[in-house]
Image: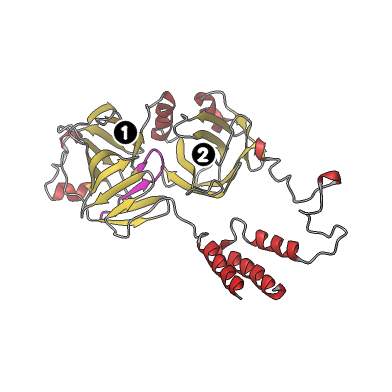
């Protein structure tokens, strides 16, 4: 009986090792968040020490309704935005998700931090005009490019862009920090760049600022298992929703829905584990093939055409991902599928063999010799333990093997 007891120990150890581990770990305390790329803490009225890929990109950010700031005397009514250097900030609460965290202010504004390679932070006004102030470090430099865009450079060269979408403005204030005023439907977006900010990055920022790109999707490897993925959806406005319905090796599928018919661009960033090659990428919208655009301007003209289009931009090797921008020519609800054509033959190994290549050992049927059932039992255990079936089914299958061995013993 000693060998049987040992087998049960092995079963329990194998089952326990199958427990999945999440990618982004949020601390249990409501005042802090720690993910794979993004970390920050909160005080009662501010997000502090916001870091992306281990670099602190700004020291604090506060949001306060304009009516409250002016009635309390923090901001004088009618003053220029550059003079808005300090606000009290609203009381905050934090809710952590798988790959993001939502910080909600008492005024109704939200600050959503996305745990992706750009560490995107989206500040939504929540239906009421808001002031936003961001304190960068004393060693960082902030520069206004226009009233919709401020560029910040940290001491180590990391770039950060503040972009206004919709009703609002952003500027460098009199203290060298960043101030924004957002209308009732305004949005402030922050994006960080660990590598050099490229022309492609500038083009994407412009698409966001002009409201032409209304959502951004990141499909990333989850944990150490190459077949497991996590999806992060960033929405630039309230009229577009995107849900990733499938992410597997070689295929990414999304459902995009808008309340308005006008076509928009969905920007995606896919890891090389999800789409290993973009050279022969196939993109379909509602099952119809999208045409490959030749440039950003060609992509932007899609809303005036009968066909959706896509544009591929390869990221740097350090990022190990590619950007695929999909311009959907019209809405309401559309199904978008991106597929690496090299994955089409991935299902050819159907566990059957023919001719001399088979010796019968891998087949689930008898090959002339009487089967003792062990191959069939082992196959059932293998099928039950495949990805997506969970720990419980794996444990049952492995115990079945142990009981079978016990009967033979």
The residue depicted at 53 percent of the width and 34 percent of the height is 324
Instruction: Between residue 173 and residue 166, name the one nearer to us.
Output: 173
Q: Tell me the element at label 2.
A: strand
Image quadrant of residue 158? top left
Q: Residue at x 66, y 73 (%)?
A: 403
- Look at 54% across and 30% down and name the residue there: 312
Residue 309 place in picture, x, y as percent? 58, 32
Query: Where the N terminus falls, by quadrant?
Result: bottom right
Q: Is residue 316 magenta?
A: no
User: Left or right of 191: which side holds 325?
Assistant: right
Which quarter of the picture shows residue 84? top left
Q: Is residue 106 magenta?
A: yes
Tell whether label 1 touches label 2 (CB within 8 Å).
Answer: no
Q: Can the viewer see residue 185?
A: no
Residue 160 disc label: 1
Q: Is residue 205 left or right of residue 330?
A: left
Mark 2 or mark 1: name the one nearer the start of the chain: 1
At which x and y percent is residue 255? 56, 47
Pick the front one: 86 or 153? 153
Q: Which residue is mark 2?
A: 270
The colour scheme of the drawn protein is secondary structure
Q: What SS does tag 1 mark?
A: strand
Q: CA distance from mark 2 to mark 1?
A: 21 Å
* Residue 7 falls in image quadrant: bottom right
Label 1 neighbour load within 10 Å: few <14, some 14-19, many 20+? many
Task: State the residue lying farthest toward the right.
Answer: 368
The magenta segment: 105-121
Against 275, is 224 above or below? below
Is residue 2 positioned above or below 156 on the image?
Answer: below
Residue 286, percent from left and from top: 64, 43
């Amino acid at each position: 009986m000693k060998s049987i007891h040992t087998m049960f120990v092995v079963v329990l150890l194998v089952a326990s090792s199958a427990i999945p581990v999440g990618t982004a770990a949020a601390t249990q305390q409501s005042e802090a968040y720690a993910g794979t790329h993004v970390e920050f803490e909160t005080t009662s009225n501010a997000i502090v020490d916001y870091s992306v890929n281990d670099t602190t990109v700004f020291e604090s950010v506060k949001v306060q309704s304009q009516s409250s700031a002016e009635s309390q005397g923090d901001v004088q009514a009618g003053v220029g935005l550059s003079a808005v250097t300090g606000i009290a900030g609203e009381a905050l609460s934090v809710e952590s998700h798988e790959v993001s965290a939502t910080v909600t202010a008492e005024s109704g504004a939200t600050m959503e931090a996305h745990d992706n390679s750009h560490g995107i932070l989206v500040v939504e006004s929540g239906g009421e005009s808001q002031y936003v102030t961001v304190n960068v470090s004393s060693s960082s430099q902030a520069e206004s490019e226009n009233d919709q865009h401020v560029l910040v450079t940290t001491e180590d060269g990391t770039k950060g862009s503040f972009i206004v979408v919709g009703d609002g403005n952003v500027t460098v204030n009199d203290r060298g920090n960043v101030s924004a005023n957002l209308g009732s439907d305004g949005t402030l977006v922050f994006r960080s760049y660990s590598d050099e900010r490229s022309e492609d990055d500038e083009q994407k920022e412009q698409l966001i600022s002009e409201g032409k790109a209304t959502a951004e999707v990141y499909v990333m490897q989850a944990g150490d298992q190459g077949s497991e993925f996590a999806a992060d959806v960033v929405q630039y406005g309230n009229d577009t929703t995107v849900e990733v319905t499938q992410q597997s090796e070689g295929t990414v599928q999304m459902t995009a829905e808008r309340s308005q018919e006008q076509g928009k661009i969905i920007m995606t960033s896919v890891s090389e584990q999800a789409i290993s090659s973009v050279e022969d990428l196939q993109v379909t919208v509602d099952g119809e093939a999208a045409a490959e655009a030749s440039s950003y301007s060609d992509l932007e003209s899609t809303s005036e055409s009968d066909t959706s289009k896509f544009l591929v931009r390869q990221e740097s090797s350090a990022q190990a991902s590619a950007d695929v921008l999909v311009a959907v020519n019209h809405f309401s609800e559309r199904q978008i599928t991106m597929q690496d054509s090299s994955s089409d033959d991935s299902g050819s190994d159907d566990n059957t063999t023919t001719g001399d290549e088979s010796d019968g050992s891998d087949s689930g049927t008898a090959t002339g010799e009487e089967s003792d059932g062990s191959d069939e039992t082992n196959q059932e255990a293998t099928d039950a333990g495949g990805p997506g079936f969970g720990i419980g089914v794996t444990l049952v299958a492995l115990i079945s093997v142990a009981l079978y061995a016990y009967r033979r013993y």
